[in-house]
Image (cartoon, grey):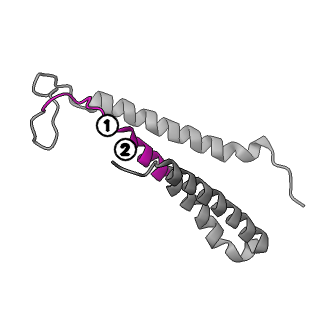
């Protein structure tokens, strides 16, 4: 029978959170205090691989580029859910298999939808 957790059980997690936050703040303060403070026209110029700046950096990108990027992230995240399932495949049994089939079916329906909408077609 599982025991009930108390707030004291979460003390290590809270302590780790506080230590991590303190390290982040300390690093930000240290880089601000110790970093170089040189300003100037040449220092503030945009530099990209030794190539001189040409035109405006606000060049509009096609929405298709962002759509493909978002769809990549969406369908790439599915691997995060499939890996633990594959590791625990035998222990999950038939129920886990049916749940994964349902998950993959939803993914395939979504993939079919974006193909039918033409989201991946480039002109």
Residue 77 visible? The answer is: no
Residue 113 percent location from the top left of the image: 57, 52
Q: Residue at x 61, y 42 (%)?
A: 15
Residue at the extreme bottom: 90
Q: Which residues are magenta?
A: 54-73
* CB atoms of marks 1 and 2 within 8 Å: yes
Residue 9 percent location from the top left of the image: 74, 47
Residue with the mark numbered 2:
65
Q: Residue at x 9, y 35 (%)?
A: 52
10 Å crowding of disc 1: few (<14), some (14-19), many (20+):
few
Q: Secondary structure at mark 2?
A: helix
Whether residue 7 sits left or right of residue 64 in the image: it is right
The answer to which of 122 and 41 lies nearer the viewer is: 122
The answer to which of 119 and 73 lies nearer the viewer is: 119
Q: Secondary structure at mark 1?
A: loop
Residue with the mark numbered 1:
61
10 Å crowding of disc 2: few (<14), some (14-19), many (20+):
few
């Amino acid at each position: 029978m599982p025991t009930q957790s108390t707030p004291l059980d979460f003390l290590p997690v809270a302590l780790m959170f506080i230590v991590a936050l303190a390290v982040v703040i300390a690093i930000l303060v240290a880089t601000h205090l110790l970093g170089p403070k040189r300003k100037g026209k040449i220092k503030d110029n945009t530099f990209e691989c030794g190539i001189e700046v040409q035109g405006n950096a606000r060049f509009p990108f096609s929405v298709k580029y962002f759509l493909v990027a978002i769809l990549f992230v969406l369908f790439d995240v599915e691997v995060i859910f499939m890996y633990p399932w594959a590791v625990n495949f035998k222990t999950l049994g038939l129920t886990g298999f049916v749940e994964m089939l349902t998950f993959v079916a939803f993914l395939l329906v979504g993939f079919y939808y974006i193909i039918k909408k033409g989201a991946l077609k480039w002109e």
